[in-house]
Image: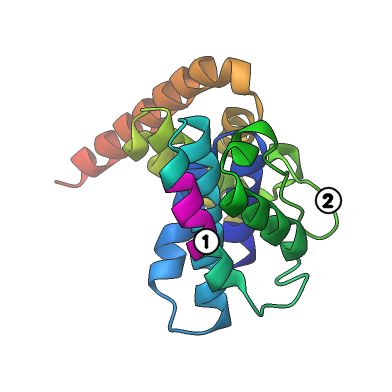
């Protein structure tokens, strides 16, 4: 859970409120009922509160603030190293006045800090890359392939070009389109090499 959690928190803290839940949702859907399921359900709804408020959907923000509060109620602070009391305080204020959410969305704190993309290790960066690809309308297959090739680099003795480009894709917001083009070109080149090798044995 830690990598999914940190990826979503970093995406949220970087201002991508709607996209943040994508880092958690697939993991959450596989959970059985219990504290972890309630925790992620509450966080997903919390990010939706902020998103709705940013779109001036005040009734949606208020309703989800009340619902998210119910999911997070009773969990200790922190839970999974996430500072929940600040989230719950924000939800309570938003339920009373949804305009509060638009005016002052809080940073999410994990392990004592408001983490951003620079704080993510590789596995969390890979999750964030996939989230940002979907949110940014980049070709998700290119990013998935790049993640697989980066994992191969980490497992082997080869270079680290895909690892480095994935970190850049996530961390360098202003350069993301350019980095994506480089990633796509490298993926296509490696796919062509793979096809050429396969062709030798067919």
Residue ranking furthest to the front: 96
Whether residue 156 is visible: no
Relative to residue 78, is residue 178 depicted above or below?
above
Q: Verify whether residue 149 appears in magenta.
A: no
Q: Nearer the viewer, residue 140 or 114?
A: 114
Q: Which residues are magenta?
A: 60-67
Counting residues from the start of the chain, the first of labels 1 and 2 encountered is 1
Residue 27 at x, y percent in the picture: 45, 66
Q: Residue at x 44, y 18 (%)?
A: 181
Q: Determine the image quadrant of residue 138.
A: top left
Instruction: Provide the secondary structure element on which disc 1 rests.
Output: helix
Per the model, the C-alpha gap separating discs 1 and 2 is 26 Å
Residue assigned mark 2: 113
Res. 98 mark:
none
Dot in front, 1 or 2 = 1
The N terminus lies in which quarter of the figure? bottom right
Disc count in the image? 2
């Amino acid at each position: 859970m830690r990598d999914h959690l940190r990826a979503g928190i970093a995406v949220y803290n970087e201002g991508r409120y709607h996209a943040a839940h994508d880092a958690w949702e697939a993991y959450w859907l596989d959970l059985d009922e219990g504290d972890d399921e309630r925790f992620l359900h509450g966080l997903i709804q919390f990010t939706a509160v902020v998103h709705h408020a940013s779109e001036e959907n005040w009734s949606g923000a208020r309703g989800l603030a009340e619902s998210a509060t119910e999911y997070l109620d009773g969990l200790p602070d922190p839970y999974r190293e996430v500072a929940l009391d600040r989230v719950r305080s924000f939800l309570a204020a938003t339920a009373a006045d949804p305009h509060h959410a638009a005016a002052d969305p809080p940073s999410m704190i994990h392990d004592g800090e408001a983490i951003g993309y620079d704080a993510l290790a590789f596995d969390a960066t890979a999750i964030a890359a996939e989230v940002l690809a979907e949110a940014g309308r980049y070709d998700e297959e290119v990013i998935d392939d790049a993640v697989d090739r980066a994992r191969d680099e980490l497992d082997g003795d080869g270079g680290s070009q895909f690892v480095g480009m994935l970190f850049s894709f996530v961390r360098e917001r202003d350069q993301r389109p350019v980095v994506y083009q480089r990633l796509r070109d490298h993926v296509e080149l490696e796919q062509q090499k793979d096809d050429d090798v396969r062709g030798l044995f067919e």
